C-alpha cells in the first residue's frame, strides 16, 4: 500500500536533482551541525538502506550530522535491525555517555546538548503514527535534567511533531501528552521535527526553559525534496542560531529553499521566534 501511494502521487512531488542543489546550498552556509529528522527511506526495503546512508554522508561527517528515524524508516518490523545498524554513525551518543540505550542519544557540541529521539515505529496499514514509549521518555527526562543542570542549550530532535493538538490522529505521536509533561517539567530550549511536510512553528510553555518568555519553540520543516505548489510544503531548511545572554538563550532563524514559483533556491521569510 505504501508503494502504491508513492507511485500514485508522492513520486511526482520529489525532485532528486533539486535535493542535491538544496544540500549544496545548505553546506555552503557552513552550519555547525545538521539535524535530519527522518524519512530518509520510503518503505524500508533492504535495497533502500545503502543509498540512504550514502546520501546521509552528503550532509557532512556523522559527528556533525544527527538523525532521528521517521515512520517511513521504520515502515515494517523486519527493517528495524537494519535501520539501527545502518544509521548508527548518526545516532550514537558521545563517547563515555551513560548507558547502552540507543535512543535517546546525547551529543554535546560546545554549549549545545543535542538529544535525538526515535518516534518511528511499524504501524498498521494507512497509519503513520509515532510512539516513544515509557523507557525512552524516562531517559529523556534524565538527559534534560542532567544537561539543564550543566547550563547547556537543550535541542530535542524527533520525527513526529510532539503536539497534543492540531495533528490528525493517524499522523500523531500517540504519547505526545507524556512527552509534553516531561518537557514542561525539565525544560528544553528548542524542539525540531519533521513528518507533517510543511513549515510549522508551535510553542510549549515551561518554567524550566531558559528561553525568553519561557516558551520552547517547536519547529517543523517540509520535505527537503518536495516541489509542491503549496508554499508551506516546498523544499526548505532552517538555519537556527543560538546565543547566550546571561542565563538566557536567544534564537535567530533563517529559512532557505525553493522560491514560491520556480526552481531557484533563495532566502525565504523565516518564522519569528
Image: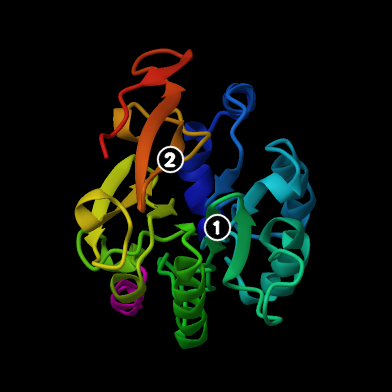
105 versus 60 height, above or below = below
43 versus 259 height, above or below = below
**Towards the viewer: 71 or 102:** 102
The mark closer to the camera, 2 or 1, is 2
Q: Disc 2 marks which residue?
A: 243
Quarter the C terminus occupies: top left
For residue 53, side relative to residue 5 (left or right): right
Q: Disc 1 marks which residue?
A: 114
Q: Which colour scheme is used?
A: rainbow
Please tell me the numbered disc located at residue 207.
Answer: none
In which image quadrant can residue 101 be found? Answer: bottom right
Name the residue rendered at 56%, 54% in the picture. Answer: 3
Name the residue rendered at 36%, 73% in the picture. Answer: 186
Badge 1 marks a residue whose secondary structure is strand
Q: Where is residue 140 in the image (x, y as percent from the top left)?
A: 48, 75
Crowdedness near tag 2: few (<14), some (14–19) or many (≥20) residues, C-alpha within 10 Å: few
Q: Where is residue 25 in the image (x, y as percent from the top left)?
A: 58, 22
Label tally: 2
Highlighted range, magenta = 173-182
For residue 265, side relative to residue 78 (left or right): left
For residue 46, side relative to residue 237 (left or right): right
**Towards the viewer: 205 or 256:** 205
**Is-magenta flag for residue 180?**
yes
Amino acid at each position: 500500500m505504501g508503494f502504491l501511494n508513492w507511485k500514485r502521487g508522492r513520486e511526482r512531488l520529489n525532485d532528486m536533482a533539486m535535493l542535491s542543489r538544496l544540500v549544496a546550498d545548505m553546506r555552503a552556509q557552513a552550519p555547525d551541525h545538521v539535524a535530519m529528522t527522518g524519512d530518509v527511506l520510503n518503505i524500508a526495503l533492504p535495497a533502500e538502506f545503502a543509498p540512504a546512508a550514502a546520501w546521509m554522508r552528503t550532509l557532512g561527517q556523522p559527528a556533525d550530522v544527527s538523525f532521528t528515524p521517521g515512520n517511513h524508516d521504520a515502515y515494517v518490523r523486519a527493517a528495524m535491525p537494519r535501520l539501527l545498524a545502518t544509521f548508527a554513525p548518526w545516532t550514537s551518543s558521545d563517547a563515555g555517555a551513560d548507558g547502552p540505550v540507543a535512543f535517546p542519544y546525547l551529543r554535546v557540541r560546545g554549549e549545545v546538548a543535542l538529544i535525538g529521539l526515535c518516534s518511528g515505529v511499524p504501524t498498521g496499514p494507512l497509519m503513520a503514527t509515532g510512539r516513544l514509549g515509557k523507557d525512552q521518555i524516562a531517559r529523556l527526562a534524565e538527559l534534560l535534567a542532567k544537561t539543564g543542570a550543566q547550563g547547556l542549550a537543550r535541542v530535542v530532535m524527533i520525527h513526529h511533531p510532539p503536539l497534543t493538538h492540531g495533528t490528525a490522529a493517524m499522523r500523531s505521536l500517540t504519547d505526545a501528552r507524556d512527552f509534553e509533561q516531561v518537557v514542561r517539567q525539565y525544560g528544553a530550549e528548542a524542539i525540531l521535527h519533521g513528518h507533517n511536510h510543511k513549515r510549522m512553528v508551535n510553542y510549549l510553555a515551561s518554567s524550566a526553559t531558559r528561553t525568553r518568555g519561557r516558551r520552547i519553540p517547536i519547529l517543523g520543516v517540509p520535505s527537503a525534496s518536495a516541489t509542491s505548489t503549496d508554499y508551506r510544503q516546498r523544499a526548505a531548511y532552517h538555519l537556527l542560531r543560538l546565543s547566550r545572554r546571561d542565563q538566557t538563550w536567544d534564537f535567530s532563524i533563517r529559512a532557505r529553499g525553493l522560491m514560491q514559483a520556480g526552481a531557484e533556491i533563495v532566502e525565504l521569510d523565516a518564522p519569528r521566534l
